[in-house]
Image (cartoon, rainbow, N blue to C red):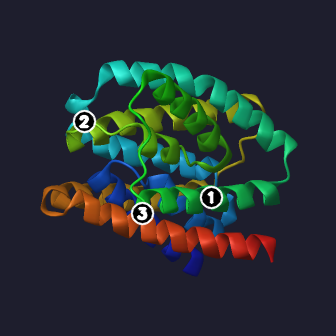
Amino acid sequence: MTSLLAAIAVLFFASMLQSITGSGFGLVAAPLLLMVDPDLVPGPLLVLTVVAMASVLWRDGRYCDLRTTVRLGIALLPGVLVGVWLISAVDPVVLTAVTAAMSIAAAVAAFAGARLPQRKSILTGAGALGGLMGVIAALPGPPLALAYAPDDRRTLRATLSVYFLAVSVVSLIMLHVAGGAEVFDWRSMAVLAPAVALGGATGGRIANRISVSGARRVTSLVILIAGSVLLVRTVA
């Protein structure tokens, strides 16, 4: 029961931040859930990501950048295929350590204000890398957070949400086809999904009252702490 309540709190907070900033759901949720209940990553978290992204799109879907979405959608496929292969070929402990390291790197890059040049080739590469990271750890966000930065925050939230939703759905399908999708505890999922939806709705209500930069700093701090603790626990 304690782990379930902790997972509910993590998912509510992660979904709220996603709704405010346009990214951060997987980055916040994955390392924390790996400490609370490792069975929730990646499969169940991918399902819950669909819920989180749908919550954002319900509000901001009309602002989606369709051209960028198509480019990213095509790019994610090879990344997902490589990720499916890695899950079957690499020790889960190694993948957990990689998840922690990627979380820390993303947080450090965010604190440093790092941004990649806004080029089509870089955006395509980020889409492919996000597909790979999405399938191995439900973490498609870091590459896009560095490579995609439109001026309109609504366009950012909507476009990234469509991409994250696509990564999650394609990853789940490929994991199922490859035989790597675990059997979910749908009773727990039925409890966790409303927490995600409620977090998204809460974030939507307060999104325009909170500085995106401030919310991102909080997100980055949580990611840095969670990733560091997870890495220490994994290698200890």
Relative horizontal placement of residue 179, taking residue 17 as reference (left or right) = right
Q: Can residue 4 be seen in this view?
A: no
Q: Judge depth for marks 2 and 1 and give the one in front.
A: 2
Relative horizontal placement of residue 221, taking residue 209 as reference (left or right) = right
Name the image quarter holding the N terminus.
Answer: bottom right
Q: Disc 2 on helix, strand or loop?
A: helix
Q: Can residue 94 be seen in this view?
A: yes
What is the crowding at mark 1: few (fewer than 14 residues within 10 Å), some, or many (at least 20)?
A: many
Reading the image, the residue beneath label 2 is: 155
Reading the image, the residue beneath label 1 is: 40
Q: Where is residue 180 in the image (x, y as percent from the top left)?
A: 76, 40
**The residue under label 2 is which amino acid type?**
Thr
Residue at image coords 75%, 54%: 95
**The residue under label 1 is which amino acid type?**
Leu
Name the image quarter holding the C terminus.
Answer: bottom right
What is the crowding at mark 3: few (fewer than 14 residues within 10 Å), some, or many (at least 20)?
A: some
Quarter of the image where one finds residue 80? top right
Residue at image coords 41%, 45%: 115
Reading the image, the residue beneath label 3 is: 111
Q: Earlier in the sequence, mark 1 or mark 3?
A: 1
Q: Disc 1 on helix, strand or loop?
A: helix
